[in-house]
Amino acid sequence: LNRFFALHVVAMPLAILLLVVLHLAALHEVGSNNPDGVDIKKLKDASGKPLDGIPFHPYYTVKDLFGAGALLTLFAAVIFFEPTFGGLFLEHDNFVEANPLVTPEHIKPVWYFTPFYAMLRAIPDKLFGVIIMGAAVMILFALPWLDRSKVRSIRYRGPLTKAAVAVFVVAFVGLAWLGSQPGSILQTMMAQIFTVIYFLFFLAMPWFTAADKVKPVPERVTMHD
């Protein structure tokens, strides 16, 4: 268990660093996205630059600095004023003297693992539960191939996609809440239902995204009020 926690502490920052490098490489290769999901490389000026393109500096650097500043402000507020955050960040059991002869009644995971912990706990078979929990994470990597819609922006998606996303959000938030609560028969049944909805969203995505009616996409990036 100690080795697992040590690996968690070391591996997570390294994984985040790797994702940052991959993100910058992809950004350099294909460019950034926009709310309309329009490929800005189609329309260029006389010098060959996209008409709707903007320089990385100062626009993106200022945007990222502002986002980092806002995140650090929230981080400092939690650290200095509410480090436990109601038990989500630092659980009550962390302030209880360790006793190897006593097992806590409710082992609650960290908040960002609660949806997947709820899936793990909802499956009676331990091995199958681990497989489901791992599949819930790995299926996210197949999302670019599962989405068959002609448009990329949610602004121009049809009612089927928007309804499916709304149901998925409810299921995911429900799993997050259930994962932070002590287990019961009713909550286990709810977690099983939400787990089925979670996977159905991805497995049915090729069909409802292809069959959904979409709105016409503009040629250039537009301003919305």
Image (cartoon, rainbow, N blue to C red):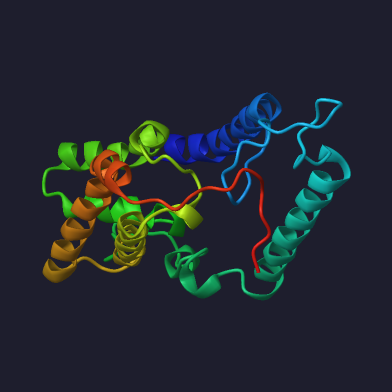
Work out whether residue 49 or residue 87 is closer to the camera in this orientation and state it. 49
Q: In this orientation, which residue lies closer to the viewer: 119 or 205?
A: 205
Is residue 73 positioned above or below 43 on the image? below
Q: Position of residue 181 (x, y in %)?
A: 30, 68
Quadrant for residue 103, please give it: bottom left
Query: In this view of the protein, can residue 64 be seen by the observer?
Result: yes
The residue lying at 62 percent from left, 74 percent from top is: 82
Please name whichever residue, 8 or 60, is drawn nearer the observer in this view of the structure: 60
On screen, residue 168 versus residue 113, left or right, reads left
Q: In which quarter of the image is residue 111?
A: bottom left
Q: Residue at x 77, y 39 (%)?
A: 51
Q: Classify residue 70 as left or right of residue 146.
A: right
Q: Locate the C terminus by quadrant.
A: bottom right
Q: Name the side, left or right, on which 44 lies relative to 85.
A: right
Residue 80 x %, y %: 71, 71
Which residue is located at x 85 percent, y 28 percent? 46
Q: Give the number of marks.
A: 0
- Residue 160 image-quadrant placement: bottom left
Residue 147 % position (x, y): 37, 39
Quadrant showing the N terminus: top left
46 w.r.t. 210: above or below: above
Q: In the drawing, does residue 77 fall left or right of residue 84? A: right
**Residue 19 position (above or below residue 208):** above
Is residue 100 in view from this perspective? Answer: no
Q: Residue shown at 50%/39% (left/top)?
A: 8
Residue 182, percent from left and from top: 26, 68
Front residue of this view, candidates 77 and 139: 139
